């Protein structure tokens, strides 16, 4: 009885940051197996972790400031002009180059400024507040859920402001310019960070995303080299296959329905944000209809079987995210 009194008393006197840091966490095994206790852990502590992130921002050393100076100057200027004068939005479109059928590339972040974002993510990793890594993909240090619909997300208010701008000011209008068919299927957002490491999570088999559009943003610094870890894309109609690699701060954007595969990383690390847009109730557009079955043979056999395996996982993951947000 006395012990219980002191325990409760300690809890009362600790601030949210201290309580979040002291909390007993699910084991890696439990997280991988997604046991019900893991879900309960995130549900039960949702408000506590939000408060802890808020407190973390104002505690200790000043955190790196995330603002529009992180974006590539050409992209930022074009986006800002387009918001002021929509007739100038073609300047945004012109910055994107189609590097594979339906896959576009552009310089997105300013490589010289990326260290600010990377320093921020390092300080997040050091914050010692429980963060939920993306399910089914990675449980390494660099993985975190970014969107408030996701349990265990990175709830630091300044980061959320940056993330919302990234989605609303940049990703959605860019996506609508490049892929007009997604209009009406882009109200919902989802995102995670991931760090591919040569000695940990090295690849992701061929799959499609349950998104209307996927934006894959590289966060590697200039000179921070890695080997392997390209993204292979498959064109179901032509059977064309190409492996694309990331330069620091570049982005690839494509319909979620374009089959793709992350190739093994053999040396170094690759840091990325992966961001999705999709519609209410998980709706996504049918892009040109499904490919005829006979065209799916050959080069796409692997992709298709992997898609069948992975799609339920991603859908389930996302439906849980959605449920959590409601
Ligand atoms: Fe993907």
Image: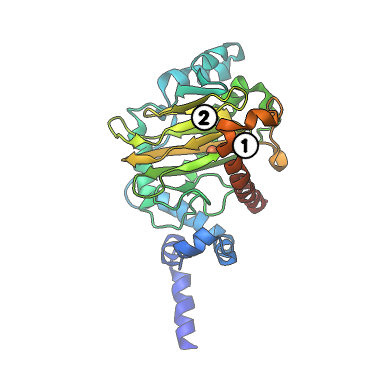
The correct choice, above or below, for 246 with respect to 133 in the image is above
Q: Earlier in the sequence, mark 2 or mark 1?
A: 1
The correct choice, above or below, for 70 with respect to 270 in the image is above
**How many other residues sit within 10 Å of disc 1, few (<14), some (14-19) or many (≥20)?**
many
- Asked where in the image residue 175 lies, by quadrant, the reply is top right
What's the residue at 57%, 67% (across, down)? 37
- In terms of image quarters, where does ligand 1 lie? top right
55 relative to 321 in the view: left or right: left
Q: Distance between the residues labelled 2 and 1?
A: 16 Å
Relative image position of residue 105 (x, y in whole percent)? 48, 23
Residue at the disc numbered 1: 211
The correct choice, above or below, for 113 with respect to 238 in the image is below
What's the residue at 45%, 58% (across, down)? 130
Q: Is mark 2 within 8 Å of ligand 1?
A: no
Residue at the disc numbered 2: 233
Element assignment for label 2: strand
- Asked where in the image residue 248 lies, by quadrant, the reply is top left
288 relative to 18 in the view: left or right: right
Relative image position of residue 322 (x, y in whole percent)? 65, 48
């Amino acid at each position: 009885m006395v012990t219980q009194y002191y325990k409760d008393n300690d809890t009362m006197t600790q601030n949210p940051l201290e309580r979040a840091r002291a909390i007993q966490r699910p084991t890696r095994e439990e997280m991988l197996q997604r046991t019900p206790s893991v879900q309960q852990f995130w549900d039960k502590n949702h408000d506590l972790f939000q408060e802890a992130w808020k407190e973390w921002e104002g505690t200790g050393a000043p955190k790196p400031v995330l603002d529009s100076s992180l974006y590539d100057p050409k992209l930022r200027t074009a986006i800002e002009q387009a918001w002021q004068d929509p007739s100038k939005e073609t300047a945004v479109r012109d910055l994107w180059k189609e590097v594979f059928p339906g896959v576009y590339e552009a310089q997105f972040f300013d490589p010289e400024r990326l260290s600010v974002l990377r320093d921020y993510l390092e300080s997040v990793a050091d914050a010692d507040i429980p963060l939920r890594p993306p399910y089914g993909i990675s449980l390494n240090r660099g993985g975190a859920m970014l969107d408030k619909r996701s349990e265990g997300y990175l709830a630091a208010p300044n980061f959320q402001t940056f993330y919302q701008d990234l989605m609303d000011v940049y990703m959605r209008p860019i996506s609508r310019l490049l892929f007009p068919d997604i209009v009406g299927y882009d109200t919902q957002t989802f995102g995670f960070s991931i760090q591919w490491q040569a000695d940990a999570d090295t690849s992701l088999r061929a799959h499609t995303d349950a998104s209307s559009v996927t934006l894959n943003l590289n966060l590697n610094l200039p000179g921070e080299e890695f080997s392997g870890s390209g993204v292979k894309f498959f064109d179901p109609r032509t059977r064309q296959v190409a492996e694309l690699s990331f330069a620091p701060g570049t982005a690839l954007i494509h319909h979620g329905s374009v089959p793709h595969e992350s190739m093994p990383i053999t040396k170094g690390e690759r840091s990325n944000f992966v961001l999705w847009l999709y519609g209410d109730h998980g709706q996504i557009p049918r892009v040109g209809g499904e490919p005829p079955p006979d065209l799916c043979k050959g080069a796409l056999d692997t992709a298709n079987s992997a898609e069948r395996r992975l799609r339920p996982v991603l859908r389930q993951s996302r439906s849980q995210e959605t449920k959590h947000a409601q």
